[in-house]
Image (tube, rainbow, N blue to C red):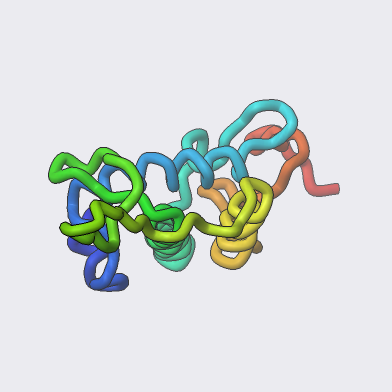
Amino acid sequence: MNWAQYAALYPDGPDESGFDRLGWEARRVMEQAATGVDGVCKLTAAPPKESAAVQAVERCQAALVHLLWQQEQAEGYAKRADGSVAGRVVTAVTAGSESVSYAAPAAASEQQRQAALARTVERYLAGVPDANGVNLLYAGRYPAVGDRRDV
């Protein structure tokens, strides 16, 4: 997925540099979910080829990017022009009394953030097969695809 495709789905999301940074993180989240106990990542070992499966993976990545961006915004972090995170967002500055107000930090814990990411992956990738017909979220050992004998 590229930024133009993402922006068509989520026009209120991050700019292109933010998308690049968060897109990498979103891909990492999807790869972790698509890796079984034997360490085989189905997204890289046998990427989906069926158009509906490819679209599900792309939309999952877009949704994860948007969720990660929303989490950053809720935590009160500002983006620099290069897409890196600068710090908390200043919401008000009063000249006479020299007070500075920051955006309120998110109440979500790291566990809650990770659970939201996992729910998003499950929503988009549950039941989606890789190129060999193995469910992307199957966590067991990857089957020997060429050696199957239907008895």
Looking at the image, is 20 positioned above or below residue 53?
A: above
Q: Residue furthest front?
A: 96
Q: Is residue 45 positioned above or below 118 on the image?
A: above
Quarter assignment of residue 7: bottom left
Instruction: Name the residue furthest left.
Output: 81
Instruction: Give the side of residue 53 with respect to residue 83, left or right.
Output: right
Count of residue discs = 0
Give the quadrant of the N terminus.
bottom left
Picture coordinates of residue 139, whole percent (x, y)? 73, 42
Seen in the picture, residue 49 relative to 87 is either above or below; the reply is: below
In the rendered image, residue 94, in percent from the top left (x then y), is placed at 22, 61
Frontmost residue, 98 versus 34 = 98
Residue 142's place in the image compared with 48, above or below, is above
Instruction: Note whether residue 114 is visible.
Output: yes
Q: Residue at x 18, y 58 (%)?
A: 96
Residue 121 placement: quadrant: bottom right
Instruction: State the residue in front, 113 or 121.
Output: 113
Q: Position of residue 8 (x, y in %)?
A: 23, 72
Which x, y percent locates residue 37? 74, 31
Residue drawn at (53%, 40%) of the image: 31
Residue drawn 69% across the image and 36% down it: 36
The residue furthest right is 151
Q: Residue at x 62, y 49 (%)?
A: 114
| Residue 128 visible in the shown view | no
